[in-house]
Image (cartoon, rainbow, N blue to C red):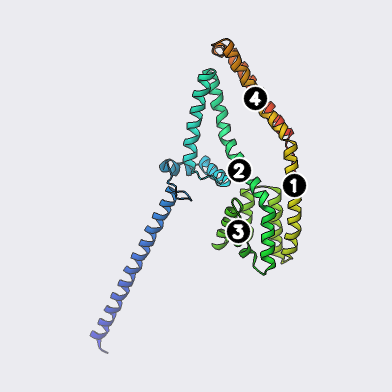
């Protein structure tokens, strides 16, 4: 046995393995740095390439419970905002409302307006979410028609969803792209469609998701189900439009009620300058103002609730 030759061979093999290990380590570290840089850049820029503001605040806010809730709501609205940007803009708006209302009426009313603005900031996100949901519902007949044509042509349901994401406008196109991306990285069809129904809750979308999931599980006639669902969604779309038209006057009344109260306050302050300051300068006046604002708010909410018709 040639011991020097064996030692040389083992040494060369160890050197080769060492070089391969160093090369693998360097490649992995470079990939990690590229991934960190890409994630950092993604956090600093929006989907359209717009540079994010308040990045440090946004990073800290995302680690909190309220920040995560704000992030979920913003994702459902489709707004190009980060939680940090939303928080700064909301605080700036509250400060502006306080100063404007306090200068126009009285400082006490500025405090009430700022407190109302806290609710209004959350109501704005809910309104944007409902608006996006309504727009998506209006696209559901077209969506089901595209899915039915694609599946009838022999395409798989996953492929049909990706094709519909390319053909449809936003918000349906954007939401279906999210579903297609989830399917591409290994999520099941049930989970991806369930997330879609969670982001945009509506009866119509729940029916569509249930139809697709059951057809995919049981292997039923997807084309026939989608054809029938398309006709039903068209009818519901027309019914919703008629109901919205009939209730438009009631919604205007709900908005006019608090506006009349503010108009009366302006009229009183115009007829007797400083009357609101004197009224809110005592505890009795402040309590009466809070009760009056509460009654106006209760009237607004009751009218909105009574005019809410689920189709």
**Earlier sequence position, callout 1 versus callout 4:** 1
Q: Mark 1 to mark 4: distance in Å?
A: 32 Å
162 lies above or below 40:
below
Image position of 45 (left or right of 304): left
Furthest-bottom residue in this view: 1
| Label 1: which secondary element | helix
What residue appears at the point 63 percent right and 60 percent down from the top-left corner? 189
Task: Check residue 258 in the rendering and tell me which mark sits there, or answer none.
Answer: 4
Cβ atoms under marks 1 and 3 closer than 8 Å: no
Task: Check residue 129 in the rendering and tell me which mark sits there, or answer none.
Answer: 2
Residue 191 image-quadrant placement: bottom right
Residue 240 in the image, given as x and y percentages of width and height? 73, 44
What residue appears at the point 70 percent right and 67 percent down from the top-left corner? 152
What residue appears at the point 49 percent right and 27 percent down from the top-left corner? 96
Q: Mark 1 to mark 2: distance in Å?
A: 21 Å
What residue does disc 1 label?
238
Image position of 190 (left or right of 306): left
Residue 5 in the image, given as x and y percentages of width and height? 25, 85
Q: Residues within 10 Å of mark 3 (few under 14, many from 20)?
A: few
Instruction: State which mark lies toward you, 2 or 3.
Output: 3
């Amino acid at each position: 046995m040639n011991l020097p030759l064996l030692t040389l061979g083992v040494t060369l093999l160890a050197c080769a393995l060492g070089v391969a290990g160093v090369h693998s380590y360097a490649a992995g570290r470079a990939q990690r740095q590229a991934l960190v840089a890409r994630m950092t850049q993604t956090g600093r820029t929006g989907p359209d390439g717009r540079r994010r503001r308040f990045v440090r605040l946004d990073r800290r806010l995302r680690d909190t419970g309220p920040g995560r809730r704000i992030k979920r709501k913003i994702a459902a609205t489709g707004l190009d905002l980060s939680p940090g940007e939303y928080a700064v803009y909301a605080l700036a708006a509250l400060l502006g409302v306080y100063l404007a209302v306090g200068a126009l009426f009285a400082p006490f009313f500025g405090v009430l307006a700022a407190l109302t603005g806290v609710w209004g900031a959350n109501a704005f996100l809910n309104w944007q979410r409902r608006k996006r949901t309504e727009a998506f519902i209006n696209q559901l007949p077209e969506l089901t028609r595209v899915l039915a044509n694609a599946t009838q042509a022999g395409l798989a349901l996953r492929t049909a969803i990706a094709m519909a994401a390319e053909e449809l406008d936003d918000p349906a196109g954007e939401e279906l792209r999210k579903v297609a991306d989830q399917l591409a990285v290994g999520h099941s069809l049930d989970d991806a469609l369930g997330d879609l129904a969670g982001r945009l809750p509506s009866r119509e979308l729940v029916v569509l998701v249930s139809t697709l999931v059951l057809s995919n599980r049981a292997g039923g006639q997807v084309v026939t189900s989608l054809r029938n669902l398309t006709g039903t969604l068209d009818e519901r779309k027309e019914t919703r439009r008629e109901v919205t038209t009939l209730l438009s006057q009631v919604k205007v009344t709900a908005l006019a009620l608090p506006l009349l109260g503010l108009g009366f306050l302006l009229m009183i302050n115009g007829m007797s300058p400083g009357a609101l300051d004197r009224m809110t300068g005592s505890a009795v006046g402040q309590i009466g103002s809070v009760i009056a604002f509460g009654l106006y708010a209760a009237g607004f909410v009751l009218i909105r609730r009574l005019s809410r018709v689920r189709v």
